[in-house]
Image (cartoon, rainbow, N blue to C red):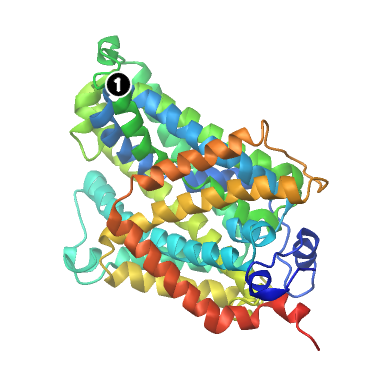
Amino acid sequence: MVDSSGLRGRLFATRDVRSLVADTEVEGQALKRAVGPIQLTALGVGGIIGTGIFVVIGEGALLAGPGVILAFVLAALACLFSALSYAELASSMPVSGSAYTYSYATLGELVAWIIGWDLILEYGVSVAAIAVGWGGNLNAFLDAAFGYALPTAISESPPDGTVNLPAVLIVLLITGLLALGVRESARANLVMVVVKLAVLIFFIVVACTAINSGNFTPLLPHGGDGVVSAAAIIFFAFIGFDAVTCGSEEARNPARDLPIAILGSLIICTVFYVLVSVGAVGIAGADTLSGSDAPLAAALKDGAGITWAAAILAFGALVAITSVVLVILYGQTRIFFSMCRDGLLPRRLATLHPRFGTPVLLTVGLGLLISVLAALVPLGEIVRLTNIGTLFAFVLVNIGVLVLRRTRPDMPRPYRVPFAPVLPLLGIAFAVYLMSDLPASTWLRFVLWLLAGIVIYALYGYRHSRLREVNRPS
């Protein structure tokens, strides 16, 4: 099964792809295959479209002017290289766990633990931060629609408030939904995706009636460098498609549906992002967008004279964030589940509920921890760990494609990355470039978290690994 000779062989022992797939068929630890291509694609769209398009377009316009439109295209291209690699590995290894599982099969147990530990933090902090944002958007919607806002004491985390009750509420509601089953969660997400796309279509249609071509000149007031800088920020509005791979084990036809969902969700979001950016620049200009905290609402108010649109867009942002919370928390539970099933974390947490077919104990535990984090902990700069964690996962997934192409050339691959190794190498290059642009404080926190993870692996994961039990002398 593995080469476990010597310390290096034990630390970097890999799981055979066939054994990984076989684990998904063992009674009592097999997730239900209940999700089709439309629901999987909606998971991708649900994970990608959040506050990004409602806010980040203003930040991009500040750096690139009307060239923010090109920045969206460039950011999508940067994501595409990694998305292609995710599609190949997901179709070849239809196993829950995403980058953690792929690393286990290609780079070994220690690397798999590191990326799994990284993703636990990334997804957890991300859900908590998004939940806090949900609370803020709830107040924005209540204010825009009814002229009312919740008291600061119960709607913001310390030090500004006492406890963020809206953040707790949304995390617990989503936790309960995920515990009920993947089919119910996917259906709810599909409804939310339809709603938020309808809000963006509303914006696009209204914008098309009031476009001023003069707002597009000069297209590149800050040159190509401005577009690249804007793309580096906008890139993070595309993150989320990787969460689709966490549903690999619950897809009815993973070999066909996962590549469709990963690439399809990225294409759909890119089309919407570009159309929205064209409409926003066309009716309001880059200066209006960059000077507002709610650039799309400002565009409709100043460019089309629609003052009541703020309530619609605030509602759209609220629904968008809700679906992101669902998708990211779903992804975290499935990565954690895979690590528990492999023995690197307590196996008891991977027990599936006999009726719901979900890891209820694990899901509820994570939901409670994240709700406390969102309610009481000032997140601040720690949110940047989401960015570096995602990019680190992108690097390993692209490397995984190259390793498996060399070590397992005959392995069935329903989908193959075209022009390999060029495109995976480009995926690595884009991710490393964006990581290098993150501040030193983020790198320090990231390294400290990984060091803590290595200590836990040494004390628990290494000794309890199922892979090591298989190879331990009787």
Query: Secondary structure under badge 1?
Result: helix
The vertical placement of 438 against 201, above or below, is: below
The vertical placement of 354 against 247, above or below, is: below
Residue sitting at x 26%, y 13%: 218
Q: How far across and down, in percent of the image, does residue 236 sit?
A: 40, 43
From the viewer's perspective, is 246 left or right of 453?
A: right
The tally of labels here is: 1
Q: Quadrant of residue 156?
A: bottom left
The vertical placement of 367 against 384, above or below, is: below
From the viewer's perspective, is 93 left or right of 313?
A: right
Residue sitting at x 16%, y 64%: 160
From the viewer's perspective, is 443 left or right of 395?
A: left
Pick whichever, 192 or 212, lies toward us: 212
Residue 354 seen by the camera? no
Q: How far across and down, in percent of the image, does residue 4 sit?
A: 73, 73
Residue sitting at x 21%, y 60%: 150
Q: How far across and down, in percent of the image, does residue 356 sit?
A: 66, 70
Disc 1 crowd, CA 10 A, few/some/many (<14, 14-19, 20+): many
Please identify the residue farthest to the bottom as the structure is shown: 474
Q: Which residue is mark 1?
A: 66
